[in-house]
Every structure is written in C-alpha cells, then in structure tokens.
Image (cartoon, grey):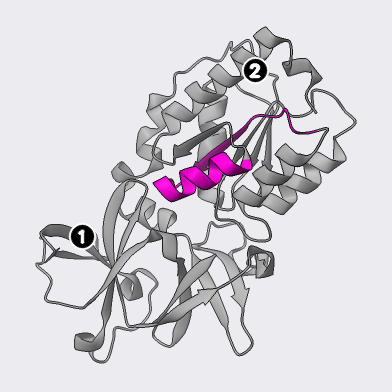
C-alpha cells in the first residue's frame, strides 16, 4: 500500500493514500458553537464544505507552533469527507502489509486504541491511524454504528450455527460486526485481527468440513491485507468455495475492480452494515440450495 506520512508534534503517523482526496494549506476555520472539542469547525474548499478535525487536540498533543504552515488532509472514506488538521506532511511511502505489526497489547491494555499498525522504516516508525474509530468517537451518528439498527433482529435464525470468520484489525469494528451478526441470529463467530490470522485459522480447519461458512474481511490490515487473503482463499483447492465478503471503508471503483479480480463474492462499504447481514443471508441461502454449504471447509 501507499501511505501518506504526516507529523504531529514531532510524531510520525500514516494514512492510506486511498483515503486521501487532496492536501491543502491550513486556512482560517469557521468555528461552530458547542461542537465536539476536537472539531475546529468548517472550511470551504473547491466549492465544498468540510468538517475540520484537529488531530493534535484529539491525541492530546501540543498545538502547532506556526499554524500558518500546517496542512489539511482532505479525506474520503465511509461515504463521508473530512479534513484532518496536521502539522506537517512528509512524503508518500510504499509499505508492504507484511512489514506492518500490530501494536503491543501493553500500549492500550484492554482499551481500544486508535493505532492499528506500526510500520518500521530504516530510521523511524510510522503509526497507522484508525480514522474510522476517530470519527466514531467524534460523531457516532455518522459512522458504522449508526447503521447497526438496519440489521434485522432474528435470534431464531436457522443459520445460527453457521460459522462466520471475521478478519478485521479495528477492535471497535470487529466487535460491532460481531454484535450485529449476533443480533441477526448468527451465534458462531470466529474473530481474527488481520488477514494472516484468518489465513492461519483456515489452514488449521481445512480438513474439518463445515468449519467456516463465510469470511468477512477488511482490506487494510497488518501482516496480510484483505485482497491478498481473498486471493489465497480463492486459489486454494480446499477453500475456494468459501464465500468472501469484503467489508471496507475503501470501497471505490478501483478497489471494487481489485476485489473482483481476486474473487470476492461481495463488496460493501463499512456504513452499510445492515446490508452486510442481508448479503450474508443471501449468499448462505443460495449455497444451501446448491447443497454446497455443508461441504465447505
């Protein structure tokens, strides 16, 4: 992947370039009364209004010494556009997901953090930020959680024991997806935090029919991304019939094409969590009619 490296109070962070629309010089922000503390206000750029989030304030870092030299990173993800205020933008780095490590549990303990991966360069490290979690904390009504009620409650679901494997590096989203699936009647959920963990699990149950009925995977994940995971599943003789649903904040025309190339059975943007359940219901229903569901890994 390509990561845009940016700096806040001397600390280096990264955002996937696929989320970035453009970079603009920091400009005067229109303040909005009673807004969330990390929300500076709004700006007007290229005939569009953007909410500005001060990442330094959100992260409890000191403010910039010279805001006139700061940068706004205008982003598009989860079907929304937001401008993130940072102190400096360094460069675009090309990084393999295989070199990205999960943060140590000692960093956050039992809490959910906003760093999902640590990329090691020759002279420094870059912390990859969970921008979905940031926006969830700032505006829950505009995030995935706001769409959770779209999933129908069905505790007596006939597919309740069908095992669903989730590959999602964000603890918040992993829990959210699990909760929605439970509400929809799916009780047998296997949670993994990246593509490599999911792949290792699948390799361990290849000789046990019925161990996985469907895989839900994010795209951005440490160690192995969702496209690579999907490709490996579909190229494996024993696993290829398992349906794979890509559920990501990075669903664009380009990533949709990539998902089709690697064999994804469905692709959904993360706010569409209600449609996620409907999609899984439909896929499993079709496979049951074909008599395929019990023969899966």
Q: Where does the image place residue 185, in percent across and percent down from the top left?
A: 57, 19
Proximity of marks 2 and 1: CB atoms separated by less than 8 Å: no
Mark 1 or mark 2, which is nearer the start of the sequence? 1
Q: CA distance from mark 2 to mark 1?
A: 41 Å
State the residue at coordinates (15%, 77%).
Answer: 27
The residue at the point 32 percent across, 61 percent down is 75
Q: Position of residue 166 (x, y in %)?
A: 63, 39
Corner quadrant of residue 143:
top left
| Residue 120 appears in the figure | yes
For the C terminus, the image quarter is top right
User: Which residue has dot 2 on it?
Assistant: 160
Left or right? Give the position of 275 relative to 85.
Answer: right
How crowded is the residue under tag 2: few (<14 C-alpha within 10 Å), some, or many (20+)? some
> Which residue lies under the disc numbered 1?
51
Residue at the spot 50% in from the left edge and 36% down from the top edge: 267
Residue 222, picture quadrant: bottom right
> Residue 154 versus residue 169: which sits nearer the camera?
169
In front: 245, or 177?
245
Image location of residue 83, percent across then percent down: 26, 65
Q: Secondary structure at mark 2?
A: loop
Badge 1: residue crowd in 10 Å (few <14, some 14–19, many ≥20)? some
Say above or below: 207 vs 41. above
Q: Outermost residue toward the right? A: 207
Instruction: Give the image location of residue 244, x and y in percent.
Output: 62, 34
Is residue 242 inside the magenta stretch?
yes
Name above or below for residue 252 compared with residue 239. Answer: below
- Look at the image and tell me whether residue 34 can be seen: no
Residue range (magenta): 239-262
- Of residues 9 and 285, the one nearer the viewer is 285
Q: Nearer the viewer, residue 13 or 183?
A: 13
Q: Is residue 291 left or right of residue 23?
A: right
**Residue 30 versus residue 76 in the image, above or below:** below
């Amino acid at each position: 992947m390509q990561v845009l490296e940016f700096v806040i109070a001397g600390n280096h962070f990264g955002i996937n370039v696929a989320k970035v629309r453009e970079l603009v010089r920091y400009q005067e922000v229109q303040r909005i009364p009673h807004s969330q503390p990390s929300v500076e206000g709004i700006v007007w750029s290229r005939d569009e209004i953007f909410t500005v989030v001060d990442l330094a304030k959100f992260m409890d870092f000191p403010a910039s010494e010279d805001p006139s030299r700061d940068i706004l990173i205008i982003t598009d993800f989860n079907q929304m556009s937001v401008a993130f205020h940072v102190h400096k933008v360094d460069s675009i780095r090309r990084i393999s997901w295989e070199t990205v490590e999960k943060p140590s549990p000692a960093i956050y303990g039992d809490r959910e953090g906003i760093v999902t991966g640590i990329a090691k360069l020759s002279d420094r490290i870059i912390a990859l930020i969970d921008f979905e979690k940031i926006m969830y904390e700032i505006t829950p009504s505009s995030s995935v959680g706001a769409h959770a009620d779209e999933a129908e409650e069905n505790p007596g679901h006939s597919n309740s024991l069908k095992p669903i494997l989730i590959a999602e590096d964000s603890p918040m989203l992993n829990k959210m997806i699990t909760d929605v699936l439970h509400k929809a009647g799916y009780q047998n959920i296997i949670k993994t935090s990246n593509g490599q963990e999911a792949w290792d699990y699948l390799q361990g149950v290849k000789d046990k029919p019925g161990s996985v009925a469907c895989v839900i995977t994010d795209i951005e994940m440490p160690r192995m991304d969702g496209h690579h995971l999907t490709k490996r599943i579909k190229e494996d003789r024993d696993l290829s019939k398992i349906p794979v649903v890509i559920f990501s904040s990075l669903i664009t025309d380009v990533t949709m094409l990539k998902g089709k190339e690697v064999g994804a059975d469905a692709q959904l943007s993360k706010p569409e969590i209600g449609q996620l359940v409907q999609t899984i219901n439909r896929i499993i229903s079709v496979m049951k009619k074909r008599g395929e569901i019990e023969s899966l890994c």
